[in-house]
């Protein structure tokens, strides 16, 4: 099926819905309840195309009913998407991201930790150019300008001064595919490949909100498209607490992270951290368990040296 074919199916269903009547915004939720109940009924009919009792004597299969009942299921699904203004392009993008999630997570599930030395690696502004991309998006979307050399990570004050809710802006950025469209930090993918080649177990741990499906699936899509060859991926707002519960024990060589919050918690508990030099984390200063770097290409040699101390 081409994108034009899918677009045509959306239009056919939309045309039919318009014949029934235009749904005002005030009752869209009620309309979705009706569509979901109808969809449930059609799925039930689809299941009846076969004998759903596993030990029944009737093994007949009605292929024509399977086809046409599946069409009804699909049309109700499109009707739900039409009800909320989603396009065929939205569905295609979401389908591709979900497919990347399924394939990448399956690959991660096959990776069984074997005791090798562990490197915990952050994503945003370690592997992705998040802050720079988000600043550009805010300037384009809301005409909000912020100093890229600011000591603040997010432009909360600037957004509030412009009458923009920072949390709603961030959610919109995610919903519009901002997390997938991030550029990679130059040399980051090669750095990960080198660490894996050198025998390290690389576990990416990000504070991104995985309860937000657009954020979660965009993250997997980004890893898939860039070709980051790590072993595992986890989401958590409390990275040190996650690490304590990870089961890696004393096999952790170091963490790579740019966040003052997470770095401070790591080093406080004796976890060595490699941190990129940024204006927003300059408050970290010097610490015996903290090493600074300027380019990802420096990291493999630094980790190789740290691993000799284990």
Image (cartoon, rainbow, N blue to C red):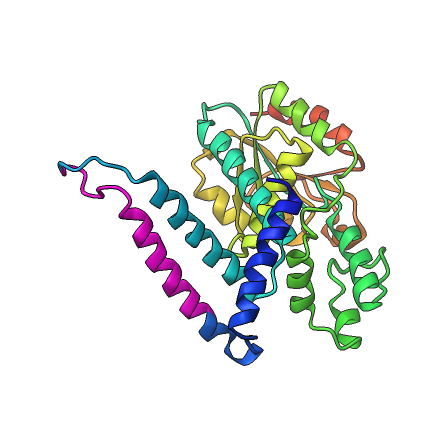
Quarter of the picture holding the N terminus = top right
Is residue 34 covered in magenta? yes
The quadrant in which residue 21 appears is bottom right
Front one among 69 and 194:
69
- Expressed as whole percent of the image width and height from the top left, the position of residue 136 reads 82, 56
Majority SS type along the magenta span: helix
- Expressed as whole percent of the image width and height from the top left, the position of residue 234 reads 52, 43
Q: Which residues are magenta?
A: 32-56
The quadrant in which residue 286 appears is top right
Does the image show residue 206?
no
Q: Is residue 224 above or below residue 278?
A: above
Front one among 13 and 79:
13
Lateral position of residue 55 relative to residue 74, left or right: left
- Expressed as whole percent of the image width and height from the top left, the position of residue 197 reads 63, 19
The quadrant in which residue 273 appears is top right
Lateral position of residue 80 relative to residue 150, left or right: left
Q: Is residue 259 above or below residue 118?
A: below
Quarter of the picture holding the C terminus = top right
Front one among 168 and 115:
168
Is residue 16 covered in magenta? no
Q: Is residue 28 above or below residue 97?
A: below
The residue shown at (65%, 68%) is 168
Does the image show residue 185?
yes
The single residue placed furthest to the top in the displayed view is 198
The residue shown at (46%, 24%) is 115
């Amino acid at each position: 099926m081409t994108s034009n074919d899918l677009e045509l199916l959306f239009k056919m269903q939309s045309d039919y819905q318009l014949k029934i009547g235009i749904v005002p915004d005030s009752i869209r939720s009620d309309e979705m309840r009706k569509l979901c109940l109808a969809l449930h009924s059609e799925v039930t009919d689809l299941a009846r195309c076969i004998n759903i009792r596993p030990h029944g004597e009737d093994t007949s299969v009605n292929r024509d009913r399977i086809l046409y009942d599946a069409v009804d299921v699909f049309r109700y699904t499109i009707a739900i998407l039409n009800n909320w203004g989603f396009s065929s392009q939205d569905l295609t993008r979401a389908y591709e991201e979900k497919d990347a999630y399924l394939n990448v997570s399956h690959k991660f599930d096959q990776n069984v930790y074997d005791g090798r030395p562990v490197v915990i690696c952050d994503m945003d502004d370690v592997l992705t150019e998040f802050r720079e991309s988000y600043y550009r998006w805010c300037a384009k979307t809301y005409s909000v300008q912020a100093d890229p050399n600011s000591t603040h990570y997010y432009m909360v004050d600037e957004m509030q001064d412009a009458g923009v809710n920072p949390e709603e802006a961030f959610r919109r950025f995610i919903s519009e595919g901002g997390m997938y469209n991030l550029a990679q930090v130059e040399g980051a993918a090669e750095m990960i490949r080198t660490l894996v080649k050198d025998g390290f177990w690389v576990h990416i741990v990000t504070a991104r909100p995985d309860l937000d499906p657009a954020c979660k699936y965009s993250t997997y899509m980004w890893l898939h498209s860039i070709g980051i060859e790590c072993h595992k991926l986890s989401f958590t707002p409390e990275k040190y607490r996650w690490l304590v519960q990870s089961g890696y024990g004393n096999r952790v060589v170091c963490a790579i992270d740019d966040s003052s919050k997470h770095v401070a918690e790591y080093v406080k508990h004796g976890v060595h951290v490699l941190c990129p030099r940024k204006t927003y984390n300059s408050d970290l200063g010097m610490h015996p368990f903290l090493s600074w770097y300027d380019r990802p290409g420096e990291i493999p040699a630094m980790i190789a040296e740290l691993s000799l101390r284990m």
